[in-house]
Amino acid sequence: RKEVEQDPGPFNVPEGATVAFNCTYSNSASQSFFWYRQDCRKEPKLLMSVYSSGNEDGRFTAQLNRASQYISLLIRDSKLSDSATYLCVVGAAGNMLTFGGGTRLMVKP
Amino acid sequence: EPEVTQTPSHQVTQMGQEVILRCVPISNHLYFYWYRQILGQKVEFLVSFYNNEISEKSEIFDDQFSVERPDGSNFTLKIRSTKLEDSAMYFCASMTGGDGNTIYFGEGSWLTVV
């Protein structure tokens, strides 16, 4: 079983749509959770940390379900500039991050 | 905004040659990392470095690889006797530590082994 698993997509959505990504992780001792965004051939950039209580940053909402070992990201009112690969990232002791394979999003006009 | 800087941005090397990838982490950060991403694949952890020594390393980080912090600012990844399968984007990253657990990535060094 993959340590961090994501649907690779691509998700093709029109501008203005709402899209949701899911991620599952296998290590129950994981301590920190993030969504990173990666543009083609660029470095991963932190989009948001994910907390058990859920958190929102503008059009982006992230949620964590520790019991199910499940993380989600919701993007509302999609923009063309949201087109990228979204990486689910899980941190364990020692601050070592484990990356999912990413979900590719393409927002079309 | 402070950033992690990496050099070179792109290097082409012949199989069997040694390569050194350089990184300048963010100045007040204490934890340093190298990750790699083979084209079309996921980002993979190589090694973490804290207090002048390796704190964690993956199975990928074998005897072919080494890291060093030769002075107060640079953090290097050395790959000895490169193989074709070492071709990848290598990302350096750093983190403050303590209560701050956000890891910031450099723009990457694209290594092509021919």
Image (cartoon, helix red, strand yellow):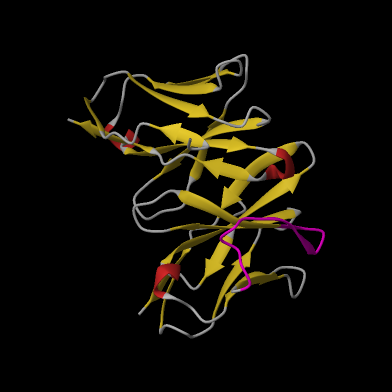
**Residue B72 painted magenta:** no
Query: Is residue A80 at least partly visible in the picture?
Result: yes
**Residue B54 painted magenta:** yes
Quadrant where the C terminus of chain A sits is top left
Vertical position of residue A75 compared to residue B101: above or below: above
Q: Position of residue A22 (x, y in %)?
A: 42, 24
Q: Position of residue A12 (x, y in %)?
A: 22, 30
Q: Residue furthest front?
A: A1
In front of the other: B114 or B98: B114
Query: Is residue B26 at least partly visible in the picture?
Result: no
Number of disc labels: 0
Q: Residue at x 54, y 31 (%)?
A: A48
Vertical position of residue B72 compared to residue A68: above or below: below
Q: Position of residue A1 (x, y in %)?
A: 48, 35
In front of the other: A105 or B42: B42
**Magenta segment:** B49-63
Is residue B39 found left or right of A89 in the rendered image?
left
In front of the other: A4 or B91: A4
Vertical position of residue B15 compared to residue B96: above or below: below
Is residue B92 found left or right of B101 in the rendered image?
left
Name the image quarter holding residue B65.
bottom right
Name the image quarter holding residue A19.
top left
Is residue A48 found left or right of B53 in the rendered image?
left
Q: Residue at x 65, y 60 (%)?
A: B25
Q: Position of residue B59 (x, y in %)?
A: 59, 58
Q: Residue furthest right?
A: B51
Is residue B8 found left or right of A18 in the rendered image?
right
Q: Residue at x 59, y 48 (%)?
A: B104
